[in-house]
Amino acid sequence: MSKPKLLRVTTHDISLNGLLKGQLRFLSQYFEVVGVAADTGELQEVAKREGIRVIDVPMHREISLWADLSCLWTLWRLFRKERPDIVHANTPKGSLLSMIAAWMARIPIRIYTVTGLRYQGVTGKFRWLLQSMEKLTCRFATDVIPEGKGVLNVLKEDGITQKPLEVVLNGNINGVDISYFSVQECPANRAQARRELNISPDDFTFIFVGRIVADKGMNELASCMRRLKGRCKLILVGSFESTLDPLKEDNEDFFKTSPDVRYVGWQTDIRPYLIAADTLVFPSYREGFPNVVLQAGAMELPAIVTDINGANEIIVNGQNGIIIPPKDKEALYHAMISFIDSPQQISSMTAKAREMVCTRFSQQEVWNALHERYIKIISSK
């Protein structure tokens, strides 16, 4: 008996490669899995590591009418040819186009996992446009899976969809690999990692991992680091963006030149940087379910996060971190000061950080729960 065919679609291959790492290989035990995304250089790596077939379909994150219509046509032809049992998509543009194309091709099961809601924090006509795109994606999907409870609540409150909504397990699209993200498995120990970053053993050190853009609260973080001059260090892992939501120019310069900041760029393995730090600082304006907060927790780091979707589902205020309002640089500053001045608080939160991730967001448990959801959906059709 042949396995059901499952097409997993993301806009770019980097999402297949990073967000769904390991999951596609696991699912291939039960399904014929095919990865579909625009190839930016990582698609064959996905094929090799996950042991699946992959298909390159050019897609653009930005709105581009002719390019999007061309992509829609390509996806429709692909789905007609492949005849999958399930098309499951995430990331905004890939999801919108693949849900419409799968509906046109009469694919019986069309699943959309909602990770982040791009219209949050946007105003005016552009917000209306992004919100309309979300509604359209949900309309053409047969099943909508919110990545976390926060996303679920927003989908209901904003009237994005009337379809039944249920989070998989405790949330997050892929869980965290608790074997890989552990202090014991890190290729560097704390002392070695600090030496390589020129951070002394006594320096209190924060870390941020992600896109270094305004939407991640990086202008507020720059302001706080200026006020904390000489009192702490910041490890900055990620890349700056010049077109999509760039920082204020003086803040980008500050992060690149300040003696209190260690800017290391984008990294494939963030563990040596996490092990060198004392606390994750993640002042983002909006998220679906931030993986880095899980990864840091698994590496025994407490976190300062904003009160946004996902982050406030991982961090329990006062237990494994502190939750502050978004876009509030005063609250961020006082939270950072409280960590610097309270080593006992750090010790207590560190002891709980890994346990609170492992018991709720283990990757294997998330994968098993997703497989069970697929079976439930298939049996209901």
Image (spheres, rainbow, N blue to C red):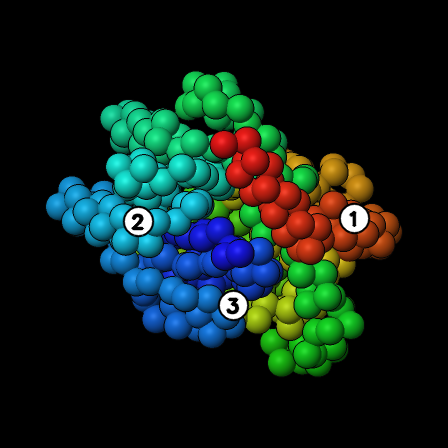
Q: Amino acid at mark 3?
A: Glu
Q: Earlier in the sequence, mark 2 or mark 3?
A: 3
Residue 110: x and y in percent read 41, 38
Q: Amino acid at mark 2?
A: Phe
Of residues 294 and 351, which is closer to you in this image? 294
Q: Which residue is mark 3?
A: 50
- Residue 3 in sight: yes
Categorize mark 3 by other alpha carbons within 10 Å: few (<14), some (14-19), many (20+).
many
Q: Which residue is mark 1?
A: 359
Task: Tell me if residue 281 comes above or below residue 171 in the rendering.
Answer: below
Q: Amino acid at mark 1?
A: Thr
Q: Residue at x 56, y 36 (%)?
A: 379
Residue 259 numbered tag: none
Q: Are marks 1 and 2 in contact (CB under 8 Å)?
A: no
Residue 226: x and y in percent read 53, 53
Of residues 137 and 349, which is closer to you in this image? 137
Residue 79 numbered tag: 2
Q: Residue at x 50, y 32 (%)?
A: 381
Task: Tell me if residue 36 comes above or below residue 49 in the rendering.
Answer: above
